[in-house]
Amino acid sequence: MISQKMVSLVKGSSVIRAMFEEGKNLAKKYGAENVYDFSLGNPNVPAPDAVREAMIDIAKNEDPLKLHGYMSNAGYEDVRDTVAKSLNERFGTSFNENNIIMCVGAASGLNVIFKTLLDPGDEVITFAPYFGEYKNYVSNYDGVLVEVSPNTVDFQPKLDEFEEKITKKTKCVLVNSPNNPTGVVYSEATIKALSAILEKKQKEYGTSIYIVSDEPYRELVYGDVEVPYITKYYRNTIVGYSYSKSLSLPGERIGYLVIPSEVDDYDDVFAAACVATRILGYVNAPSLMQKVVARCINEKTDISYYDRNRNTLYEGLTKLGFTCQKPEGAFYLFLKTPVADDKEFVNAAKKYNILVVPGSSFGCAGYVRIAYCVAYETIVNSLPKFAELAKEYDLT
């Protein structure tokens, strides 16, 4: 018999993954070209050529015993040094290898830092809409996820409600910008105001409250939009990063944590996070991929492909009468459903072989997420089907 905790998790297993599996079944039935699957944020822009070249060169020319062996739980020292220097050049920070822990993607990084920081009953505040797995990551360590309700005007955080929900039990504030599922980037004004609130609350309660900034989409921004680097605005900030989207490597599971020397109890936090990588079973980040991302530290995927999809989808949907937030980053579009029940709308869309994810899965009912990291032809060919869907709801 599985644990009672897992019984509930199995029943509530990811809606996104379930939709993805349904898409594969529909593709077998109707042909992949006739199914418009916008469920999964799986990059369809290939990794830069330099990534493959680095993999081959490193595998061929490095000592296999060293390359495939254990190293420090935090990762190779030279890789961490390369990451730190890159961040310093880009953001004017002053990190070194002892501020970086290489992780098995951003998801493991979040689990590592929550294992490090949370005692049972500690609270983690996040802003809806948010990635649904956050609930599980926090509850893994008997923490409590506290939601700030969504601001559906522009999807910047509701800071007045945020301030009211901070308590003596607040240990972390989990932010995600560019945001999944909205594609919104939290502005510098928002980050400054959020930081000021936390400084005040730390003094009021005599506690340390850490911002944990989840940043897998940092490099995916459009036009002249800038994503504030939060360590520059708030001392107690820890950053989780992934190369899944920036280098189109989601299956390779490689990323890092930044733990600045300025955070409260830095020595204990860094040491505990290194131990957490081991006792959680990750042990260390994949050795080959650490070497590859260090070699390719300045490489980027071509996001002009996503930008074309973004503009075509947004313009097409708004012309049909749908209301949606135009994303500034990531590769998701958040569409307001013409009925209050977003799950009803999701089921209606399936009749036209359109697969989207209900916003209620992200703590924001009445919306759906559309992942536009798909072939451009999928975007173009889906619009007549969206037109039929719009007609069903008398939008056109």
Image (cartoon, rainbow, N blue to C red):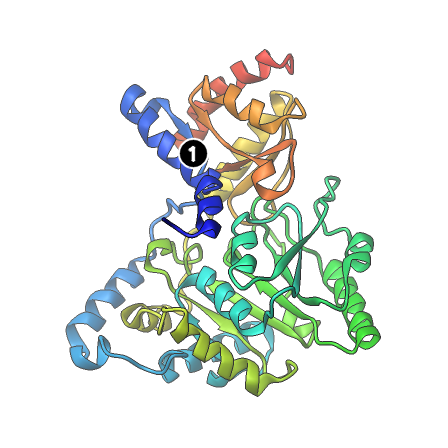
Q: Quadrant of residue 274?
A: bottom left
- Placement of 119 over or under 72, stated as above or below: above
Left or right of 279? Residue 238 is: right
Q: Residue at x 66, y 22 (%)?
A: 339
Q: Residue at x 31, y 81 (%)?
A: 71
Q: Residue at x 60, y 66 (%)?
A: 120
- In the image, 114 versus 3, the foreground residue is 3
| Residue underneath mark 1 | 19
Binning the other alpha carbons within 10 Å of mark 1 as few (below 14), some (14 to 19) or many (20 upward) gives some
Q: Residue at x 77, y 57 (%)?
A: 165
Disc 1 marks a residue whose amino acid type is Met
Name of the residue lying farthest toward the bottom: 267
- In the image, 22 versus 94, the foreground residue is 22
Q: Is residue 63 visible?
A: no
Q: Position of residue 295 (x, y in %)?
A: 33, 72
Q: Position of residue 232 (x, y in %)?
A: 67, 74
Q: Position of residue 26 (x, y in %)?
A: 34, 24
Q: Secondary structure at mark 1?
A: helix
